[in-house]
Image: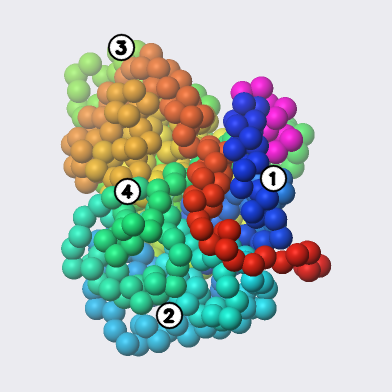
């Protein structure tokens, strides 16, 4: 927190947070706030928790982060299915075998948590994977239990109904639920739910300011750039990989430079998930390139040259590294297959990049530098509760192109003010036009970028998120009633 206060434009946010927190802190004294989720790396939740926990601790709250695990790939297959069903997609048949697996893994994970929690503690369960934990914790230990669901869909279909019916028995154990958008609150949780926007940490390696030299060094050291000269720091042990025309992967700078420092770059950084809309984005960019090559003006005007030089970077984590995302390999394979079928010159203009996850800090710096090297950041999600990548790019004053039908992006980005929103992320034509428009107007890019940063400042920083949590906790009668420990227990 002290570090935030040293940054001129962040100091007011910290002051506001401290003064608002003063009311609730005495009620949290002696309690531990447990954050429980299913993965330490990869995806938005793992991204947000460290900053949240650190700031809570800075405020004087005892906060702990517990990652539930499982050696059973079938468990993560199931939770991935539930994730997709909540987003309205997939086979809705969830039966007794699935319930048994879901509960068995959670029962095992409850054992450890049971040893840790004390009466009066606050347990915040993130997303569906650890959902049954709340009901499995011993009833003899009074706890305040909150479910923080980061996903949802603003519509109902057979898939969403199946997911919520499956999850229903576990919901009653919670005192309250938190969602990222009002549209996501299922009927059965109406009246005991609150909306809290996620927030990004502006000083984390993912978002912190990078000097020109620093950004170039990160790109060089990670292999995202053909290095123009020697660098002070050595190469990262694991290098970013890029798809070759035959579909294999090699260090991203091994064949030719992507052009991150000199070309207009359109970037999407996401998990390899079908709902992130990578494939239509690749198709739209391919169309854009095709129409430029067929156009008569060629590269004569500055505008034509801008489009001619533009490149698309599709980046995501090394798929081998994320245990709870079994679909990632498949999605990446499909994308690579589409890439290999493109004509050579179009392939040159598209880089499918995998970012090593061995070091979280280096991975974050790579994403940071990639986003900063972009003229436009796209988040072409078909569904998106809240796009952290959107907030990250906006914070860096990079204009964002996203989908107005997804609940998160339409709150995050005001179309034409902070960036652009399209109606349909699968409409290749619409996407192509939007990219073309955005690329061709550098003045508007500046305008969108400035507004975007201001919007994140006001609404989507971790400090605003913590204030919302404070307000929620302050309203919870249980925080007054439940016992708490009188002294720390030496954990
Ligand atoms: N991310 C990352 N490395 C990658 C790909 C993604 O650190 O190789 C991060 C990305 O910067 C963002 C998070 O993963 O912070 C994804 O969060 P988002 O809300 O965009 O999507 P989710 O994964 O939660 O669906």
Task: Please tell me whether mark 3 sits on a helix, a strand or a loop.
Answer: loop
The residue segment tinted magenta is: 1-10
Count of numbered marks: 4
Q: Spatial distance from mark 3 to mark 1, Cα to Cα? A: 55 Å
Q: In this view, does 441 lie above or below 199?
A: above
Of marks 2 and 3, the one in the foreground = 2
For the N terminus, the image quarter is top right
Neighbourhood count class around disc 4 (C-alpha, 10 Å): few under 14, some 14–19, many 20 upward: some
**Residue identifier under label 1:** 59
**Residue identifier under label 2:** 102
Neighbourhood count class around disc 3 (C-alpha, 10 Å): few under 14, some 14–19, many 20 upward: few
Q: Quadrant of residue 303?
A: top left
Residue 57 appears in the picture as rendered: yes
Neighbourhood count class around disc 1 (C-alpha, 10 Å): few under 14, some 14–19, many 20 upward: some
Neighbourhood count class around disc 2 (C-alpha, 10 Å): few under 14, some 14–19, many 20 upward: many
Q: Do the residues labelled 4 and 2 touch (CB within 8 Å)?
A: no
Q: Spatial distance from mark 2 to mark 1, Cα to Cα? A: 35 Å
* Location of residue 266 in the rendering, given as x and y in whole percent from the top left corner: 39, 33
């Amino acid at each position: 927190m002290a570090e935030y206060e040293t940054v001129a434009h962040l100091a007011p946010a910290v002051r506001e947070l401290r003064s608002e927190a003063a009311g609730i802190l005495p009620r949290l004294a002696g309690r531990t706030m447990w954050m429980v989720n299913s993965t330490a790396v990869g995806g938005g939740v793992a991204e947000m928790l460290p900053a949240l926990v650190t700031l809570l601790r800075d405020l004087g709250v005892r906060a702990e982060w517990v990652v539930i695990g499982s050696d059973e790939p079938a468990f993560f297959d199931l939770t991935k299915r539930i994730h997709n069903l909540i987003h309205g997609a997939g086979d809705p048949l969830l039966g007794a075998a699935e319930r048994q697996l879901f509960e068995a893994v959670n029962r095992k994970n409850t054992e450890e948590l049971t040893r840790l929690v004390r009466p009066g503690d606050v347990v915040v369960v993130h997303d569906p994977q650890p959902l049954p934990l709340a009901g499995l914790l011993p009833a003899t230990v009074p706890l305040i239990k909150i479910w923080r669901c980061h996903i949802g869909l603003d519509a109902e279909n057979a898939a969403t109904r199946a997911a919520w019916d499956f999850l229903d028995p576990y919901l009653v154990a919670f005192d309250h639920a938190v969602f990222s958008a009002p549209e996501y609150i299922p009927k059965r949780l109406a009246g005991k739910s609150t909306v809290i926007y996620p927030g990004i940490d502006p000083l984390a390696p993912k978002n912190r300011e990078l000097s020109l030299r620093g950004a170039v060094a990160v790109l060089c050291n990670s292999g995202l750039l053909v290095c123009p000269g020697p660098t002070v720091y050595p190469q990262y042990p694991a290098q970013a990989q890029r798809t070759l025309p035959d579909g294999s992967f090699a260090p991203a700078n091994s064949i030719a430079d992507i052009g991150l420092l000199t070309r207009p770059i359109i970037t999407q950084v996401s998990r390899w998930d079908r709902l992130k809309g990578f494939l239509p984005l690749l198709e739209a960019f391919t169309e854009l390139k095709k129409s430029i090559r067929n156009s008569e003006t060629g590269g004569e005007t500055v505008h034509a040259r801008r489009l001619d030089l533009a490149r698309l970077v599709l980046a995501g984590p090394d798929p081998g590294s994320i245990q709870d995302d079994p679909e990632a390999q498949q999605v990446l394979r499909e994308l690579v297959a589409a890439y290999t079928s493109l004509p050579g010159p179009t392939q040159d203009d598209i880089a499918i990049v995998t970012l090593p996850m061995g070091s979280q800090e280096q991975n974050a710096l790579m994403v940071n530098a990639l986003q900063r090297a972009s003229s436009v950041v796209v988040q072409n999600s078909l569904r998106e509760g809240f796009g952290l990548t959107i907030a990250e790019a906006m914070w860096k004053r990079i204009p964002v192109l996203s989908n107005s039908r997804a609940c998160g992006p339409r709150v995050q980005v005001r179309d034409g003010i902070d960036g652009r929103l399209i109606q349909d992320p699968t409409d290749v034509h619409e996407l192509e036009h939007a990219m073309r428009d955005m690329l061709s107007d550098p003045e508007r890019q500046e305008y969108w970028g400035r507004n975007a940063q201001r919007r994140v400042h006001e609404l989507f920083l971790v400090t605003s998120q913590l204030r919302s949590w404070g307000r929620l906790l302050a309203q919870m009668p249980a925080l007054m009633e439940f016992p708490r420990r009188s002294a720390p227990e030496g954990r």
